[in-house]
Image: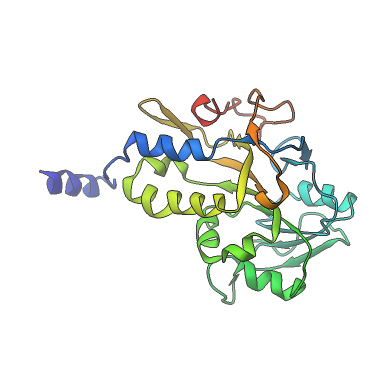
Amino acid sequence: MKQLITNVGYSLGLNITKHTNESDIIELIKKLKPLDCGKDLIRIGGNADGGYLIPNDLEGIEYCFSPGVNTVSDFENHLASLNIRSFLADYSVDSPPTKNDKFTFDKRFLGADDTETFFTLKSWKDKYLNNYKGDLLLQMDIEGFEYEVIFNTPMDELNKFRIMVIEFHYLDRLFDKFAFSFVFKRCFEKILKGFHVAHIHPNNSGGCCKLGSIEVPRLLELTFYNKNRVFDTKNTDCVFPHPLDRDNVTNKKTLYLPKCWYS
């Protein structure tokens, strides 16, 4: 019967899989609960897509790595006004949407291998900042490739970033038992070895899906703060959305972070 249902699903263009245990998803979500890390959050970038909340701890950071350019560079322009240079990369475009003498652009995608069209985070960093000892900033929105980048990047390389802002895609797959175990759980637990979650913002362009009591936005922007910069943490008393949060897409309904992600 199980195989018959699976085959019927395939014939309809559907992949029918086992659901993840709700308790396993809840346990992972608890680990991702945003914490008050002792720094106020500030908004860098514009008042729509391309703006992110990060801890107010940029002093001493000289460089940002920002893969995924598309048509917006508000985040990098804001950093440039703070005298922080940005390395940008995206094979789908020929240049950033705006010119700035503090931008360095590579026409490459970020991924798990070094090829003509892809390079790894370590290779990219070493190309410009080999043996650099200062803290770095990462802002990554690369349409699902974030998972292979995290898996491929050694932890000692990730730890060179003081702050990481990453948009995670396809989070409705958390309900797929295989994807949960071998992608999402491994990815997030790796990051959490060296970072606290400082903020979560759902991208309202993706909507939400639900299983039982669990609601999962399909697109989530997570701000990670290196544990080396944090002296103490406490449960955040912030009401979501944060006063500085903005909708990514103005012509769609606001998507509020489901309470199971922070309460």
Q: How many marks?
A: 0
Q: Seen from this angle, which residue lies furthest front?
A: 231
Q: What residue is shown at x 76% (from left), y 50% (from top)?
A: 73
**Residue at x 59%, y 55% (from the top left corner):** 142
Q: How is the image coloured?
A: rainbow
60 relative position to 51: left or right:
right
Q: Residue furthest left?
A: 1
Is residue 225 left or right of 217 when viewed as pictured?
A: right
| Vertical relation: 255 (above or below) 78 | above
- The N terminus is located in which quarter? top left
The picture places residue 234, in percent across and down from the top left corner, at: 64, 32
Q: Is residue 125 above or below residue 150?
A: below
Residue closest to the eye, 47 or 97: 47
Side (left or right) of 36 relative to 151: right
Where is residue 211 shown, x and y percent of the image?
A: 36, 30
Front one among 225 and 259: 225
Residue 256's x, y, as percent? 58, 26
Residue 75 appears in the rendering: yes
Residue found at x 60% / y 28%: 252
- Reply above or below: 94 against 249: below
Q: Is residue 113 left or right of residue 224?
A: left
Which corner quadrant of the image does residue 128 belong to? bottom right
State which quarter of the image contains the C terminus. top right
**Residue 164: horizontal and vertical position, in percent?**
67, 51
Where 119 falls versus 184 (above or below)?
Answer: below
Query: In the rendered image, which quarter is residue 219 located in?
Result: top right
On the question of residue 111 being in view, the answer is no
